[in-house]
Amino acid sequence: MKFPKDFLFGAASASYQVEGAWNEDGKGLSNWDVFSKLPGKTFEGTNGDIAVDHYHRYVEDIGLMAEMGLESYRFSISWPRIIPNGQGEVNEKGIEFYNNLINECLKHGIVPFVTLYHWDLPQVLEEAGGWTNKNTVEAFVEYARVCFEAFGDRVKHWITFNETVVFCAHGYLAGAHPPGIVNDPKKYFQATHNVFLAHGRAIKEYKRLNQYGEIGITHVFSPAFSIDDNKDNIWAADHSNEFELNWYYDPILKGKYPEYVVDIIEKNGWTPDWTASELNEIAEAAPLNDFIGLNYYQPKRVAKNTASADSVATGREKSTGAPGNVSFDGAYKTVMMEDKVYTKWGWEISPEGFLQGLRMLKERYGDIKLYITENGLGDEDPIIQGEIVDVPRINYIKEHLKAVKTAIGEGINLKGYYAWSVIDLLSWLNGYKKQYGFIYVDHKNNYNRKKKLSFYWYKHIIETRGEEL
Ligand code: BGP
């Protein structure tokens, strides 16, 4: 079987992780420009000042994507490049950069798939309370409208937010992302609600403009499975899915928060400050949502946590689903299992968990249109006689694409796959050491690009529409 004709083979990036040019052409400061420079916040103090210099090399990079046969490029727009102060004046140089990027994609027949928010918030807004401040919602809708009006004639696929669970949990529970707040569930739930509201208002605005494209949101997809048949552990997995899947997917797809979580946060005094009319807006926006993007790296293997609450971790790997963490409420822990396979960074490799999760999703939400907006292997790639032989990455992507094929065969409405990442880039907390790309960047040698083995492999997969998988 070949993949269907309208299925998009893509790859992804995000502005802060590739662009660099952090203070050029009128760009404002982002929260990451500031946070990454605080001592001890990132791996070896790495930051995105230069990143992989995509801002200056996008023509070369898109040329390479075209050579690979890439059908679609998922990238994000840097909000402070467009509106340096978060609200108000638009930076024409910023508009020009993304116009050039989009036009370059289209010149090669590459479909631009654009994320509006991949975590680089204007610093001005962060200082005013970031996502806990309702004004950020207003500001986001204004920024979204500027982008729709500037680029919507050519961009027909929009993602509002990337991985709300990550920037909110890291920002307000683990303290590992800006604003670096530790263990504040009240703020965490407030931030998530404000993001869902901003998403709802932005898609309403998009539909009002009648641009005839599609718009959705991208979520982490890390379904939890109990480590065994023990009823406490099964409860723990359900609890995890309520808090980390249903809390995120229900408001978008059902227009309503899951009652299980609503009850618990109410008892703990963590209920966001929300109004009946905001809840109504979220309900009204749900049917306008065209698709959901899934970022899948690993499932969660979950057991009930029996240790005391003060052993709850606040480290930086928390909330990614990676093993060895206790949930913020102390209810469950993620466990490394002997019979599973892990990456060098301890993330489980499980195409089976992916497929099982997709089936769970179909059962709960029906035939909603899906894109896999991120999936890939973070590795330190072997270099042999000057060639980057990233065989483990090829295997990882191969097995996950097979799962996608099986899912499509089962009638799951999956319309595209975006490998993370198109090119080696800055990992938020792991620097340049953790590589994901099809294209290698030589940081010691003028940021020169080099094609990896996976580049040729993916090219072949696209050419043959995955027939051999
Ligand atoms: C996702 C993010 C990406 C990317 C990826 C890999 O959560 O959307 O931006 O960073 O994870 O993560 P890491 O670099 O931590 O391995």
Image: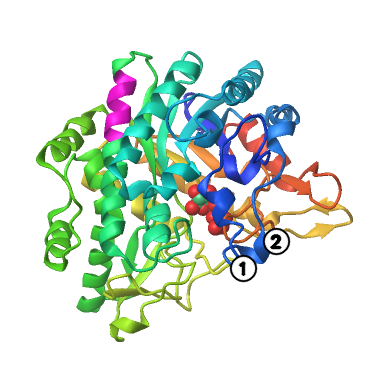
Q: Amino acid at mark 1?
A: Lys
Q: Is residue 287 above or below residue 427?
A: above
Residue topped by disc 1: 344
Mark 2 and mark 1 lie on one chain; the one further toward the N terminus is 1
Q: Residue 205 in magenta? A: yes
Residue positioned 24% across, 39% down in the render? 253
Magenta stretch encompasses residue 270:
no
Q: Quadrant of residue 45?
A: bottom right
Q: In the image, which residues are magenta?
A: 199-207
**Position of residue 465 measured from the top left corner of the image (x, y, whole percent):** 57, 32
Please provide percent x and percent y for residue 44.
67, 65
Check disc 2 and give the amino acid type. Glu
What residue is shown at x 42% (from left), y 55% (from top)?
A: 166
Magenta region, main secondary structure: helix
Name the element at disc 1: loop
Q: Is residue 139 visible?
A: yes
Query: 10 Å neighbourhood of mark 2: few (<14), some, or many (≥20)?
Result: some
Q: Quadrant of the C terminus?
A: top right
Q: Percent position (x, y) of residue 213?
A: 39, 19
Residue nearest the observer in this picture, 3 or 271: 271
> What residue do we see at 33% from left, 63% from top?
224
Residue with the mark numbered 2: 380
Separation (CA) of disc 2 from disc 1? 8 Å
Give the camera-side residue of 175 and 374. Answer: 175
Q: Are marks 2 and 1 in contact (CB under 8 Å)?
A: yes
Examine the image and state in which quarter residue 94 appears. Answer: top right
Q: Would residue 451 be found to the left or right of residue 341 on screen? A: right
Q: Which mark is residue 464?
A: none
Residue 466 visible? The answer is: no
Q: Position of residue 91 (x, y in %)?
A: 55, 25
